[in-house]
Image (tube, grey):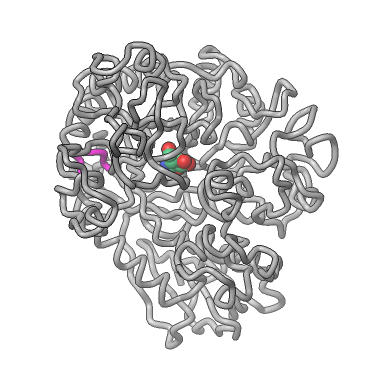
């Protein structure tokens, strides 16, 4: 940790510890195939991102997280990795990656890359070797191969279902089956095999040596498994508590892997960082977020919350306390590449009336679309207004803010993608009942016209709707009231205002109006309700507001609006 030395007025030497950069970073997630396309093949690429480094710097973020850009057959948007230590030739070369990293670093922006350790692609050389080598071979031991059930082994070993639908087992030509928790093309690795462990250490070193600052760890809670026979059925699995010994999920022994990774991270100066994508119970999160393990863990609670003051308050209070238990900082996410954009989630006016029984997937993008897409009513303006208010609330919270490309433009989910152009395996493996995640992965609009709204010189790999024109960067950057201008102003102010990680709630007398104070008198008020909220007379000047506040408005917070206030 860096230590600075300040001279206090009385000449006493004060040692001030500077917090590591990641603790309160604004991290911008780039989905590389949909960000910017430099070579005109319809897929975003490294040089496309390089051409937009000024945009990233002007936005005011501290780091970018690059979703997978590795060679991949794109069975799962790049989360099916064929080679962990290379760049997909359609996206560029390692030299392009180095140039991008250098350009980002030159603008003071850190680089985080995605590590996908639970599974490879079926195109990975190891899996190809496993297929060729046959049963009982060392090559198959890198994955999870089993004999089938039934008299002739023609049934899968268990009735487990994959995350994208269908059986979690796939049969290969010689009759054995392999486990794939996700798509068929994503065989699970065997983390009991030391060779697997050694290879990931090599990968972490490979990218760290190239100057990468940190890693986002995909499904960090799933790597290690106890596959002792007989394997349990789905019904039996559901009865087993997820307390560290569950056969498939959130096992305590996964932290042996991360302890080894921590040694790697800490062997660099500054230490490399990591953030876990771990879908685990709250009391299990600190294990992933501890300094001996990955150091930080995603908190997805806001992804599944309504635009509701009580829910937001509870989530913030809970997660700040939870982060303190591991000594980490909290993370905040409203959108990412796996869920419906928050402008859309907040704009669906008839959510509760839609078909689909599970409240959570209904809200974060699964269930309501199963059969309800054509019945969903979207109030676009309201969705955008609420999204701006929620984003400004999030950007004032202590901890790291993870932003997803396009949210700074106020983009909605793209619902109108023809079946023939959909890509997400969720869509195909659920017999087209769930639309999946393509709608938040549509290439960004950089200008209001041109073959792909400035994304590239040709078309885009997912179709962009006509309304993207209104959200083009070149339009929004000249509009002081645009969502892009709001994000720029807020991110710049955040740098000025942010110091310690404390947050103190201020009672407002209204359950639908939240207010909190950060160190040095920075105050935030969010009105989640539909009635304006009068600011107390002693409130400081309005520094930024998510909606134009109108005349003399600095004393009133309109409906569904956040304001940041200067110290009174
Ligand atoms: C989580 C990733 O965010 C998601 O996009 C992916 O499909 C699964 N993990 C499998 O890698």
In the rendered view, would you say 465 is above or below 176? below
Asked whether 72 or 562 is in front, the reply is 72
Q: Name the residue located 38 percent from the left edge and 72 percent from the top edge.
A: 313
Q: Name the residue located 59 percent from the left edge and 43 percent from the top edge.
A: 59
Direction from residue 136 to residue 162 in the image, left or right: right
Task: Examine the structure image and report whether residue 294 is included in the region drawn in magenta.
Answer: yes
Direction from residue 379 to residue 130 in the image, left or right: left
Q: Which residues are magenta?
A: 290-295
Classify the position of ligand 1 by quadrant: top left, top right, bottom left or bottom right: top left
Using the rendered view, name the quadrant where residue 115 is placed: top left
User: Picture coordinates of residue 377 (x, y %)?
Assistant: 68, 71
Q: Quadrant of the N terminus?
A: top left
User: Picture coordinates of residue 169 (x, y %)?
Assistant: 37, 37
Task: Examine the structure image and report whether residue 193 is included in the region drawn in magenta.
Answer: no
Q: Main secondary structure of the magenta part?
A: loop
User: Picture coordinates of residue 121 (x, y %)?
Assistant: 44, 26
């Amino acid at each position: 940790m860096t230590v600075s030395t300040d001279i206090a007025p009385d000449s006493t030497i004060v040692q001030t510890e500077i917090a590591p950069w990641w603790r309160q970073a604004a991290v911008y997630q780039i989905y590389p195939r949909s960000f910017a396309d430099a070579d005109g093949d319809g897929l975003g690429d490294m040089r496309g991102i390089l051409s937009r480094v000024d945009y990233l710097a002007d936005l005011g973020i501290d780091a970018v997280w690059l979703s997978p850009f590795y060679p991949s057959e794109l069975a799962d948007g790049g989360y099916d990795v064929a080679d962990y230590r290379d760049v997909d030739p359609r996206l560029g070369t390692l030299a392009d990656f180095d140039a991008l990293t250098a350009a980002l670093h030159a603008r003071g922006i850190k680089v985080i890359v995605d590590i996908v350790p639970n599974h490879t692609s079926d195109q990975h050389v190891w899996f190809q070797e496993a297929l060729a080598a046959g049963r009982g071979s060392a090559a198959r031991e890198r994955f999870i191969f089993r004999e089938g059930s039934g008299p002739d082994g023609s049934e899968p070993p268990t009735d487990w279902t994959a995350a994208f639908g269908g059986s979690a087992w796939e049969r290969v030509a010689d009759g054995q089956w392999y486990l794939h928790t996700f798509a068929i093309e994503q065989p699970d690795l065997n983390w009991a095999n030391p060779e697997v462990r050694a290879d990931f250490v090599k990968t972490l070193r490979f990218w760290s040596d190239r100057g990468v600052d940190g890693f986002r760890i995909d499904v960090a809670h799933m790597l290690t498994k106890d596959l002792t026979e007989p394997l349990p059925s789905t019904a039996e699995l559901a009865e087993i508590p997820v307390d560290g010994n569950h056969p498939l999920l959130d096992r305590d022994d996964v932290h042996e892997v991360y302890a080894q990774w921590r040694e790697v991270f800490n062997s660099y100066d500054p230490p490399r960082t990591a953030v876990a994508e771990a879908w685990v119970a709250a009391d299990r999160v600190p294990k992933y977020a501890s300094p001996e393990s990955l150091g930080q863990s995603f908190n997805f609670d806001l992804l599944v919350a309504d635009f509701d003051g009580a829910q937001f308050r509870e989530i913030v209070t809970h997660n700040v306390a939870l982060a303190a238990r591991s000594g980490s900082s909290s993370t905040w996410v409203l959108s990412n590449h796996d869920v419906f954009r928050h402008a859309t989630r907040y704009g669906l006016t008839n959510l509760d009336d839609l078909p689909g029984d599970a409240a959570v997937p209904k809200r974060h993008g699964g269930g309501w679309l199963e059969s309800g897409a054509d019945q969903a009513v979207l109030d676009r303006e309201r969705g955008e207004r609420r999204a701006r208010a929620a984003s400004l609330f999030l950007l004032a919270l202590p901890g790291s803010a993870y932003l997803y490309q396009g949210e700074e433009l106020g983009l909605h989910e793209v619902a109108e993608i023809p079946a023939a152009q959909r890509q997400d395996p969720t869509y195909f493996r659920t017999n087209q009942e769930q639309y999946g995640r393509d709608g938040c992965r549509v290439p960004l609009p950089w200008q209001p016209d041109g073959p792909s709204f400035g994304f590239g010189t040709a078309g885009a790999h997912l179709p962009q709707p006509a309304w993207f024109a209104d959200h083009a960067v070149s339009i929004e950057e000249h509009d002081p009231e645009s969502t892009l201008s709001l994000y720029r102003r807020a991110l710049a102010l955040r740098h000025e205002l942010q110091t310690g990680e404390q947050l103190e709630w201020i009672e407002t007398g209204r359950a639908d109006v939240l207010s909190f104070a950060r160190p040095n008198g920075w105050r935030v008020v969010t009105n989640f309700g539909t009635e304006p909220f009068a600011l107390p007379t002693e409130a400081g000047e309005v520094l930024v507001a998510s909606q134009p506040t109108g005349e003399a408005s600095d004393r009133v917070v309109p409906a569904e609006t956040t304001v940041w206030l200067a110290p009174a």
